[in-house]
Amino acid sequence: MTDKSLFVDISGSVDGVVYPLHYADIQLKHPERRFKAGGIVRCRILIVEPARSRVVLTLKKSLIDSELSIPANVDALKTGTLTPGVVAKILDKGLVVELFGGMKAFVPQSEAR
């Protein structure tokens, strides 16, 4: 976790966190100008972490407004299924994509379009 993560008070002892990758669909140079303490934001839950009393949130409009189905677990992912995700890392041989629920997928370079 970086010191640039946004923390959100959800209720009682549950915290929400938004990591810099999920501030917006584009990289923000000055996120402090866009997000003010006490402000209201529209977000979507990416990961629920009950052991840490925390939820990880996204502020990306493309994920918030997506009408694609969200898989409940890795077994729900089938070849050819479209699901929202975010490219988290670009590697020499492909991409690491973050999916809802904390799942990550590797997309080989030959299959990336």
Image (cartoon, rainbow, N blue to C red):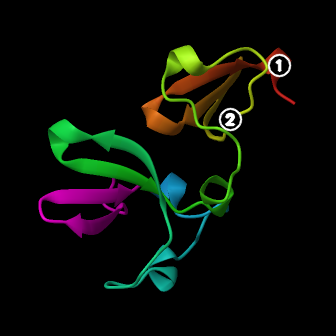
Is disc 1 in contact with disc 2, using a CB cutoff of under 8 Å?
A: no
At a point 56% along the width and 35% down the height, the residue shown is: 99
Q: Is residue 26 magenta?
A: no
Answer left or right for 68 relative to 24.
right
Disc 2: which residue: 83
Q: Position of residue 11 (x, y in %)?
A: 20, 66
Please, what is the three-letter code of the amino acid marked with disc 1?
A: Glu
Q: Is residue 84 visible?
A: yes
Q: Is residue 92 visible?
A: no
Answer left or right for 19 relative to 96.
left
Above or below, 45 relative to 98: below
Q: Position of residue 64 (x, y in %)?
A: 60, 58
In this view, the residue in front, 29 or 68, is 68
Please, what is the three-letter code of the amino acid marked with disc 2?
A: Thr
Disc 1: which residue: 111
Above or below, 45 relative to 38: above
Q: Is residue 4 magenta?
A: yes
Q: Position of residue 98 (x, y in %)?
A: 55, 35
Name which of mark 1 and mark 2 comes first in the sequence. 2
Q: Indicate which label's residue lies in the foreground, 1 or 2.
A: 2
Above or below, 43 relative to 50: below
On residue 51, the disc is: none
Q: Position of residue 55 (x, y in %)?
A: 32, 50
Mark 1 and mark 2: span between their CA atoms?
A: 16 Å
- The magenta segment is 1-19
Q: Secondary structure at mark 2?
A: loop
Answer left or right for 42 relative to 91.
left
Above or below, 73 relative to 58: above
**Residue at the extreme left:** 13
**Residue at the extreme right:** 113
Q: Quadrant of the C terminus?
A: top right
Answer left or right for 18 relative to 108.
left
